[in-house]
Image: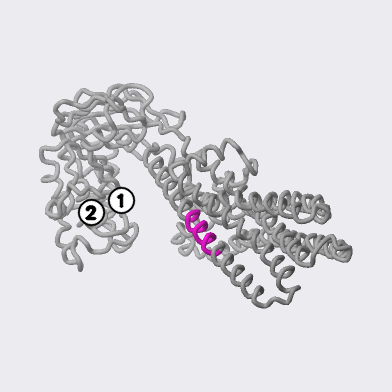
Amino acid sequence: MAENNYHEEEVLGKAYDARLMRRLLTYVRPYKLPIVVAILVLIAGATLELLLPVMIQIGIDKYVMAKDMNGVGKIALVYAGILLAAFFLSYVQMYITMFIGQKVQYDIRMQIFTHLQKLHLAFFDRNPVGRLVTRVTNDVNVLDELFSSGLVSVFGDIITLFGIIIALLYYNWLLALITFAVLPILIFATALFRRKVRNIYREVRTRLARLNAFTQEHITGMTIIQLFTREKAIFGKFTDINRDLREVNLKSIYYYAVFFPAVEIISSVSLALLLYYGGFQIAAGALTFGELVAFIQLVQRFYNPIRDLSEKYNILQASMASSERIFKLLDTKPEIISPTDGSRPVDIRGKIEFDRVTFAYNGGDNVLKDVSFTVSPGEKVAIVGATGAGKTSLISLLFRFYDYQQGAIRMDGVEIKDMPVEILRRQLGLVLQDVFIFSGDYAGNIRLGNKDISDAELSEALKKVNLHEFVFQSEGGLKAEVKERGATLSTGQKQLLSFARALAFNPRILVLDEATSSVDTATEKMIQKALDNLLENRTAIIIAHRLSTIEKADKIIVLHHGELREMGKHHELLEQKGIYYRLYQMQFKQDELKAVV
């Protein structure tokens, strides 16, 4: 179960992929000027850093050795000025790079979310919500590290490294070669560290993804866990997964704890060799004491960018893995394509035609088979059938949540595949059995961001569904707070709110997908009473399990195993004594039994 949610995290790919990097760099192109400024500032700062050992050398050789205290004071002021200037440049460089990182992070998140809104519903059927949220949050955060603290800093480290090498060779090429003698050991230690950390990083990502998937799934299902008192068992599983993550993180800590002291030891050995040979050169008059001190300072600075580049390796590796997953999502093509120059009905009246429609999910067995019927403008048509008969699939095709494989669906004579999706859905209103309520307020939940709908229209919609009094009794009225998923609302109130939402958009065609099947009898009567007014002069398609709610429908369509088996008015279908008759008799007996109980 959890494995399906984290298997993508296991594949890290290469630590550096030029193809992915080129694509990532397209996000920083709009910010070329700030990047250039950041690099120039960084170079200036690195140059000032290299001047500090020079100031020390001058101070020692020219003033300290000559016991010139005024000169020492002056060189100290110059040293402090360089420090302050370096601090200011470091602040400017850090601010610019962080600014670029946040801008790029914002742009990528906007692109991902915009793309997600364009994807077909079948994509969301196949991809867990937790994984998609990870793409928008965690993976983008990783890229933020690359752009804000990685990309420019790497340039800075490389520039600093070459600057120090040139300075070392300039001061004393023999001592520089002695310093570089330990580099093969350092390179070997760094390569070994990178290989070990790479494997550990893969394990951390795998176990972290497993923990995320497990946590999300079981918090979502907390009602079932508590209902069946499985808290102890689930806690045991969580403990095991959490322990695995802790152990692998401890491994990474071990390698870091070994590598960085190893670099310190190598640098200390290098320093010892410098002091030994430097002492001989001072005695021979080939080197001044100030030059040796400056040289040692440069050597100590020499190892800082090496350590930093080793840390940047992890950021680079994580960025490559995250960018690959992000680009895989962005490269997913929507299956439902809205024609940019599509047709639209000249006069939208609400006529719907299903013409020999056949449909299957993901290439499986057909859930709708050669279905044909017509809904005339203003007609109230009910669709009934046992669970799995294809009722909801029929509605999903009408809204173009999915595309049918054979046949045609037309609205006022125009095939819906030839219509822009936004124009098609603007004519349709849908009330589902499972109502989704957003956190916010009542106005936001009805208006859904459409500023063209006024408060007066919201109020009118609430009156028509008999929810006006309840909403305006709340403190704040339309602005009263609504909890996430409508936690403080009853099932009936959620249904009524979804009715108001559909009415506020004033669709030409209203679809009710078992909208009253999960409410109590009193609420159902309230909704049913409002329906007569709501559906007036409006084409309506009503899917219902409770057959008593659709007895007045102009036409009843009976689906069975994806096929249209019967069609007619309520009394006509009862007289046929077919599938509809059996469904009605079965439900009638159930209602009688409930009444007795």
- Residue in view at x 50 percent, y 48 percent: 35
Of 318 and 416, nearer the camera is 318
Evaluate whether residue 546 shows in this view.
yes
The label number, if any, that marks residue 435 in the structure image: 1
Q: Residues within 10 Å of mark 2 (few under 14, many from 20)?
A: many
User: Label 1 sits on what residue type?
Assistant: Val
Q: CA distance from mark 1 to mark 2?
A: 9 Å
State left or right for residue 481 relative to residue 101: left
Report the magenta residues as a range. 87-98
> Is residue 96 positioned above or below 84 on the image?
above
Residue receiving disc 2: 497
Quarter of the figure that contains the C terminus: bottom left
Q: How many labels were placed on the picture?
A: 2
> Magenta segment, principal secondary structure?
helix
In the rendering, at what x and y percent does residue 211 appear? 57, 56
* Of the image marks 1 and 2, the number of the one nearer the N terminus: 1
Badge 1 vs badge 2, beta-carbon distance below 8 Å: yes
> Is residue 269 positioned above or below 73 on the image?
above
Element under label 2?
Answer: helix
In the rendering, at what x and y percent does residue 371 appear? 31, 25
